[in-house]
Image (cartoon, rainbow, N blue to C red):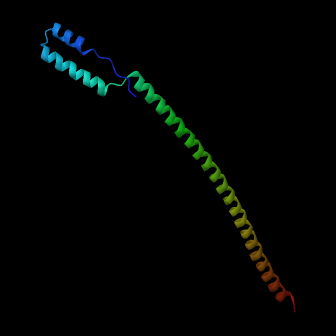
């Protein structure tokens, strides 16, 4: 809640009249200032209340961000582990393919040599 700013309209009207402003204008100025102070001026209490609210919201956002970062780290570690497994499987598959092709080549070479060597 807003704490109301104290403004003495009568004293303000008296000051204006003392400086040569006619009473009707002095009252209009005082009413305008009084209304502006009621509607537009933030008090120290208003600012402190807003500061507390903002600090709370910032702390909540910080907590949420930390949790999201932790979740992302966990997901990233899991994805890295999956990729390592996939790479190991691919490496094994390539190794088996190379051995199979190598064996086929050697088998073919042996067959060809046997044809030439055998009478």
Which residue occupies the foreground of this view, 72 or 21?
Answer: 21
Which residue occupies the foreground of this view, 77 or 28?
Answer: 28
Q: Is residue 62 above or below residue 51?
A: below
In percent of width and height, residue 45 lies at 42, 23
In percent of width and height, residue 88 lies at 72, 63
Q: Is residue 11 above or below residue 69?
A: above
Which corner quadrant holds the N terminus? top left
Residue drawn at (47%, 32%), measured in percent from left and top? 53
Q: Is residue 44 above or below residue 11?
A: below
Horizontal side of 40 relative to 56 (left or right) equals: left
Q: Residue 14: which quarter of the image?
A: top left
Residue drawn at (13%, 9%), measured in percent from left and top? 20
Residue drawn at (84%, 86%), measured in percent from left and top? 114
Q: Is residue 93 above or below residue 76?
A: below
Which corner quadrant holds the C terminus? bottom right
Q: Residue furthest right?
A: 119
Q: Residue furthest bottom?
A: 119
In percent of width and height, residue 25 lies at 14, 17
Horizontal side of 31 relative to 42 (left or right) equals: left
In percent of width and height, residue 17 lies at 16, 10
Q: Residue 98: which quarter of the image?
A: bottom right
Horizontal side of 101 relative to 52 (left or right) equals: right
Q: How many marks?
A: 0
């Amino acid at each position: 809640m807003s704490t109301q700013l104290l403004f003495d309209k009568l004293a303000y009207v008296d000051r204006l009249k003392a400086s040569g402003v006619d009473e009707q204008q002095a009252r209009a100025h005082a009413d305008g200032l009084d209304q502006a102070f009621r509607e537009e001026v933030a008090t120290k209490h208003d600012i402190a209340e807003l500061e507390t609210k903002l600090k709370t919201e910032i702390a909540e956002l910080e907590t949420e961000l930390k949790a999201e970062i932790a979740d992302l780290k966990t997901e990233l570690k899991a994805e890295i582990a999956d990729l390592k497994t996939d790479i190991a499987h691919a490496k094994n598959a390539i190794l088996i393919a190379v051995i199979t092709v190598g064996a086929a080549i050697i088998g073919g070479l042996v067959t060809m040599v046997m044809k030439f060597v055998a009478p």
